[in-house]
Amino acid sequence: MELFLLRHGIAVEKGTPGFENDSARPLTPGGIKKTRKIAKGIKRMDLKFDFILSSPFLRAKQTAEIVTKALKCGRKLKLTKSLTADEKPESILKEINQTYKNAARLLLIGHEPYLSQLISLLLSGDRKIQINFKKGGLCKLTLDKALSPSSATLNWLLTPGQLEKI
């Protein structure tokens, strides 16, 4: 399985008046523009996904919608609570193993530090590896067997700037 992880785009800062509910923080206008450029980079890489799983938090959902529109694969988008900022990475592993185990390529869209903890868990078996995963960054992991701790190989971690230049 190839597992791709995308951190949501630039969003309204936490604690901004009018956006006290963390799950309702949207992408900023600049974040939308930058995410569109990132989505074009992903398209130019000719990446195809069996499913795109996203946190239902607004900023991740907006990121997912921009990407699925650019890739013309909106029907593949599924929102899942397992990718919300307050969940543990083990919850998405369980969901993938139960529901998406036959997928060859999955894209997960979510939050920090969740995504870095998930990458660390898949690479090393614990969540302690420090990863600088920028907003709009994209990571590729390859798994030879069932999705479980210490089962992945890191193929690459691209910054938003690198994706925009592709």
Image: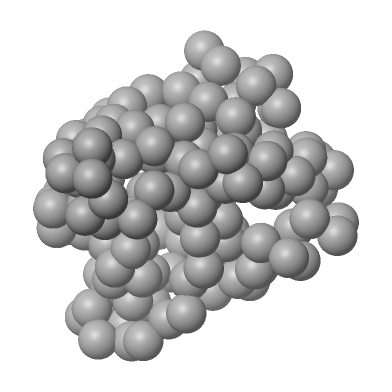
Task: Tell me how many marks there are.
Answer: 0
Q: Is residue 124 visible?
A: yes
Residue at the image position 58 percent from the left and 39 percent from the top: 29
Q: Is residue 123 left or right of residue 68?
A: left
Looking at this rendering, what residue extends furthest in the bottom direction? 129
Which image quadrant: the C terminus? bottom right
Q: Is residue 164 above or below residue 46?
A: below
Residue 99 in the image: x percent, y percent? 28, 29
Q: Is residue 16 left or right of residue 107?
A: left
Q: Is residue 143 above or below residue 103?
A: below
Residue 78 in the image: x percent, y percent? 37, 24
Residue at the image position 61 percent from the left and 46 percent from the top: 30
Q: Is residue 36 left or right of residue 142?
A: right
Residue 40 in the image: x percent, y percent? 78, 40
Which residue is nearer to you in this view: 2 or 34?
A: 34
Q: Is residue 71 above or below residue 126?
A: above
Which residue is nearer to you in this view: 147 or 82?
A: 82
Residue at the image position 33 percent from the left and 63 percent from the top: 112
Residue 165 in the image: x percent, y percent? 86, 60
Q: Is residue 146 left or right of residue 152?
A: left
Q: Quadrant of residue 57?
A: top left
Q: Is residue 124 above or below residue 116?
A: below
